[in-house]
Image: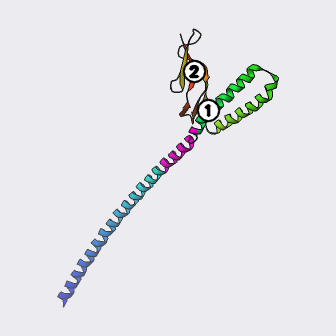
Amino acid sequence: MNEIKIKDATNKKEIDNKNDNSIVFFKNKLEISKKKIEEMILKQNDEIFKIKNRLNSEVQKHQNFSLEKIITEFLSIIDNIERAVNLIKQKKENKYIEILKNIEHVMFLINNMFTEFNVSKINDIKIPFNPDVHQAISVQYTDKMKSNQVIEVMQSGYIICNSRLLRPAMVVVSKN
């Protein structure tokens, strides 16, 4: 009988040891699984963040440049309005003063709209010629300025969002 008790106790210890080993084994497996899940969650969050940034960038790009086509079509109207203002100012007749005030008010509204939509005018003179934003239509020989300088702007150019050229400025360039 003692023999059976000893055998039962030995079997019980073996079973307990096996159970302890199994518990340790499964705890280790659980810890590894938890770490893998945490890594996967971090990777997914990183991917979601990248996708969100990319989409925000695309939306911003489309918002900035969505009006490009209509503004480009509008530029010839602005040119004609500017010519009318210059012509009226040259005439200096009193009968055109009211018309001039109205046209200047329209130009003020257009300039405000351009400011709101981040459209910049290219019409600076006495700056170096830049083929990215200028189109040379004439060369003027002079000793008064360095070569390759913008002397006169024949037609203003426009840039939207300080990055995309809507129309190059047509300019006269100096040459020694």
For the point 42% across and 56% down, the residue is 44
For the point 35% across and 64% down, the residue is 33
Q: Residue furthest left?
A: 3
Q: Answer with left or right where residue 57 lies relative to residue 11.
A: right
Residue 125 visible in the current orientation: no
Q: Is residue 79 above or below residue 32?
A: above
Q: Position of residue 134 (x, y in %)?
A: 54, 24
Would you name the residue on which mark 1 appears?
75
Would you name the residue on which mark 2 appears?
171
Q: Position of residue 108 (x, y in %)?
A: 71, 33
Q: Is residue 102 above or below residue 144?
A: below
The residue segment tinted magenta is 52-69
**Mark 2 residue crowding within 10 angstroms, few (<14) / some (14–19) / many (20+):** many
Q: CA distance from mark 1 to mark 2?
A: 17 Å
Provide the secondary structure element on which disc 2 rests.
strand
Q: Residue furthest right?
A: 94
Q: Amino acid at mark 2?
A: Val
Q: Nearer the viewer, residue 18 or 81?
A: 81
Asked whether disc 1 touches disc 2, contact meaning CB atoms under 8 Å apart, the reply is: no
Q: Nearer the viewer, residue 145 or 175?
A: 175
Provide the secondary structure element on which disc 1 rests.
helix
Q: Nearer the viewer, residue 113 or 47?
A: 113
| Prevailing SS of the magenta stretch | helix
Q: Which mark is residue 46?
A: none
Q: Answer with left or right where residue 79 lies relative to residue 164.
A: right
Q: Is residue 126 above or below residue 108?
A: above
Q: How many marks?
A: 2
Of circles 1 and 2, which is in front?
Answer: 1
**Mark 1 residue crowding within 10 angstroms, few (<14) / some (14–19) / many (20+):** some
Residue 75 visible in the current orientation: yes
For the point 48% across and 47% down, the residue is 54
